[in-house]
Amino acid sequence: MPSSMNDERPGTRLAILAEGLYLANLLLIPGIAFLVLLALWRRHRDAPPLARSHLQQTLSASLWAGMLLIVANAMILLLGGYHGPYTWAIAITYFTMAHSTLILFGMIGLVRALAGQCWRYPLIGRPLPPDCPQ
């Protein structure tokens, strides 16, 4: 484990940036942070294993988050629209179960990136490369 900032693993800063952008996409600036994350992923495909892993994980998780949001909205529309009786039940269930879980995954990913370690998002994450530091 690195003992100081000068000894940090290659790709640590990029991994931290990827996790921060993932959380920003979920919490602060959705869409914009995703586009920046996508551009970062495209630009740094040959990044060190740590950074590449975190970029792949956060991009995959962001795509899953977008898909889950679309599914939640589709359910609302199918069950009566936004003025229907099930709107709040679906919205509250989505935010309590799916969205908060994705945020928790992002926080764990950020902590692992700060520690210079790889981490696979449970269920939705991509397989880790074999050369990724654990």
Image: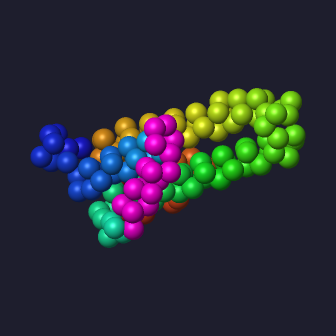
Figure quadrant of the N terminus:
top left
| Residue 47 colored in magenta in the image | no
With respect to residue 101, does 74 lie above or below? Answer: below
| Residue 37 colored in magenta in the image | yes
Q: Is residue 134 visible?
A: no
Majority secondary structure of magenta residues:
helix
The answer to which of 56 and 31 lies nearer the viewer is: 31
Q: Position of residue 29 (x, y in %)?
A: 46, 43
The answer to which of 35 and 40 lies nearer the viewer is: 35
Q: Position of residue 77 (x, y in %)?
A: 81, 45
Q: Which residue is drawn at 40% across and 47% down?
A: 21
Q: Where is residue 69 in the image (x, y as percent from the top left)?
A: 66, 46
Q: Which residue lies furthest to the left in this view?
A: 6
| Left/right of residue 98 with respect to residue 126 in the rendered view | right
Specify start and end residues of the magenta stretch as a single range: 26-42
| Left/right of residue 6 with respect to residue 49 in the rendered view | left
With respect to residue 45, does 121 lie above or below? Answer: above
Q: Residue at x 33, y 66 (%)?
A: 44
Q: Where is residue 81 in the image (x, y as percent from the top left)?
A: 82, 41
